[in-house]
Image: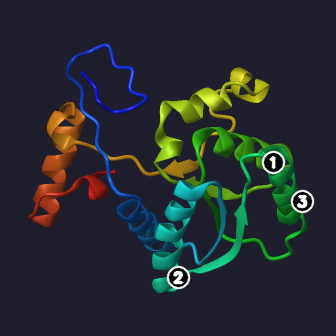
Amino acid sequence: PSIVPGEHIKSPWFYKTLFSSHTEGVFLASYAKHVYEYNVVDVIYTDDYANTIKQDFSLPFIGIGGKIKNEWRINKNNIENDILNISKKLLAGQHPADAIFLATDAAVAAQIIALIKRKGLIYKIFGNHFLAEDEFIAELSYFPEELYNLGYFSNKVAAVSPLILDIGNEKAQVFKKSFIDLYKRSLNWVEAS
């Protein structure tokens, strides 16, 4: 049985990968800077845990030459007003950042992304593992645009998600073999995701 709070798995056997916010933050910072080639990022975050993720992303990103243009905190007791104020600042921005990093839970991220898109703002958005979980898609499904056009809000939103190759399907095994053949070494979940 599961001893992880919030897990509602009907099977006695399941696997879940966990990684520290530091590992996630460093990976996201490096990926943002070196793969996506973002130089300037705005950060939106919420509570204490999200603040930790924000710091675990921001410090390495700055350390490798990136710049954090704005950091906006959303108060859980004032979500709608805070998101509206942030969207006004984004609309007024003359020199927008290359992307927005979301260090929030799935519900807040869904609200932010919906408001940004509804305001006609075009931003590259990426975030922590909460954006790779089913809860994020479920939160988006409350919006009519998403009901009539699946992916309306979630397309092109990037998130980190661990991959366990040892339990992956045939395509995962082909990917693993191709990587080993090309680089002459095995890969870890960070490289695989």
Task: Sort mark 2 into few (<14), some (14-19) or many (20+) by Cα contacts within 10 Å.
Answer: some
Left or right of 87? Residue 167 is: left
Q: Earlier in the sequence, mark 2 or mark 1?
A: 2
Residue located 44% across and 68% down the image: 35
For residue 108, above or below residue 9: below
Q: Amino acid at mark 1?
A: Asn
Residue located 49% across and 50% down the image: 159
Give me the C-alpha separation between circle 2 and circle 1: 29 Å
| Secondary element at tag 1 | loop
Q: Residue 28's x, y, as percent?
A: 45, 63
Coloring scheme used: rainbow
Residue located 17% across and 51% down the image: 178
In the rendered image, which residue does mark 1 sit on?
78
Nearer the observer: mark 3 or 1; the answer is 1
Say which of 142 and 37 sits in front: 142
Q: Residue 165's x, y, as percent?
A: 19, 42
User: Furthest residue to the top?
Assistant: 10
Residue located 52% across and 55% down the image: 49
In the rendered image, which residue does mark 3 sit on?
88
Left or right of 15? Residue 34 is: right
Q: Residue 2's x, y, as percent?
A: 28, 26
Asked if the residue under mark 1 is in contact with the one under mark 3, i.e. CB atoms within 8 Å, the reply is: no
Task: Sort mark 3 into few (<14), some (14-19) or many (20+) by Cα contacts within 10 Å.
Answer: few
Give me the C-alpha separation between circle 3 and circle 2: 26 Å
Say which of 117 and 111 sits in front: 111
Q: Earlier in the sequence, mark 3 or mark 2?
A: 2
